[in-house]
Image (cartoon, grey):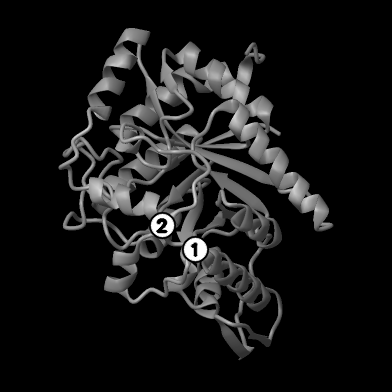
Amino acid sequence: MTLHFGYWTPVYGGFLRNVGDEGTPATWETIRSLSLTADRLGYHTTLIPELYLNDRKGVDAPSLEAWALTSAVLAVTQNLRVMTAIRPGFHHPAVAAKQLSTLDSIAPGRLALNVVAAWWAEEAKQFGGDFPAHDERYAQATEFVEALTGALATTPFSYDGDFFTLTDTIVEPKLSGELGIFAGGESAQGRDAIADFANAYAMHGGTVAEIRDKIADMQRRRAAKGRPPLEEFAMSAYVIVRDTEAEAQAELERITTVDPHSPGYASFQEFTANSALDVEVSAREYAVGTRGLRPNLVGTAEQVAEKIRAYEEAGLTLLLIQSSPIESELERIAAEVFPLVHGAPVTV
């Protein structure tokens, strides 16, 4: 399958934990301009993360709510798919199904979900989220998707689970097409649950070999359950493209100079403590989150494109880009990297 380019919407005013002002304030004006630019440039998908506290710039910093933002982004764009994160501990599946039904009427066929087993205990405490133990969060996610998709498929719909109950629930209208349901997880228990309830897999940044192995593992799990292959595989990555490799490395050094006193450092520590990760995250890597630096998409356009083509050969279908400042960097990537990825063979 052809690899598509997407990006993270910076709901928290950028992506960098060690850099305060990235020139992308957490405002609708910022997101509207970015969304229109990305839509014009041909980006396929934007991931809108759901966090009620700001884990990049510090808990006191402004951030935007994912579902209100989703409606606005869909309304002002024409082709961009919006993949919105949803944490089952913060939503009832029937209400979420009704939201999706309404959003699909705004932008038919341009919705996807990223089901996230929440990791931030402090956020759950402040905003009333249900925050069970790690393995239970995947059981909760399984029930959530079963109940949500059931309500979107059947009227009336009833469901009686350990976490959610629906009784003769009516959700109309139905969706115009199939809903892409992404989820990410690295523990064996998490991957096994995702192989049941999702039709797409979202990954933190990894090496080509790591991504190839994860894709193969998830497809094996699907086959073992008698399920069709997963349809999409997404990976988050921080991208730096410059005219020379030296300039790219200088920018990498600038953004990864670790400040343990930066506002986002505490949330990084809580994330690593509450997640079952399959590789260790260094303090340097924490600078951008989601292990975005691990793929090492840093260099000239030619160098970055060559690495991206290797991921496409490994089975990746969606690259979710973080960069800073995001709008001008997306323009550069579209102009310089897109043609090299889509028009040249893999040589790695």
Q: Which of 177 and 288 is in front in this view?
A: 288
Q: Mark 1 points at which residue?
A: 134
Picture quadrant of residue 233:
top right
Position above or below: 313 against 152 = above
Amino acid under disc 2:
Asn
For the residue pair 304 and 259, the one nearer the viewer reads as 259
Q: Earlier in the sequence, mark 2 or mark 1?
A: 1
- How many labels, in total? 2
- The x, y position of residue 294, in whole percent, is 45, 30
Q: x%, y% of residue 263?
A: 18, 47
- From what the image shows, is residue 339 above or below residue 88? above
**x, y percent for residue 235:** 53, 39
Looking at the rendered structure, which numbered label has been put on residue 274? 2
Q: In this view, does 88 lie to the left or right of 177?
A: left
Q: Is disc 1 placed on a helix, strand or loop? A: helix
Q: In this view, does 208 lie above or below 261?
A: above
**Residue count near mark 2 (Cα–Cα under 10 Å), binned few <14, some 14–19, many ≥20:** some
Residue 83 percent across, percent down from the top left: 51, 53
Q: Residue at x 33, y 38 (%)?
A: 286
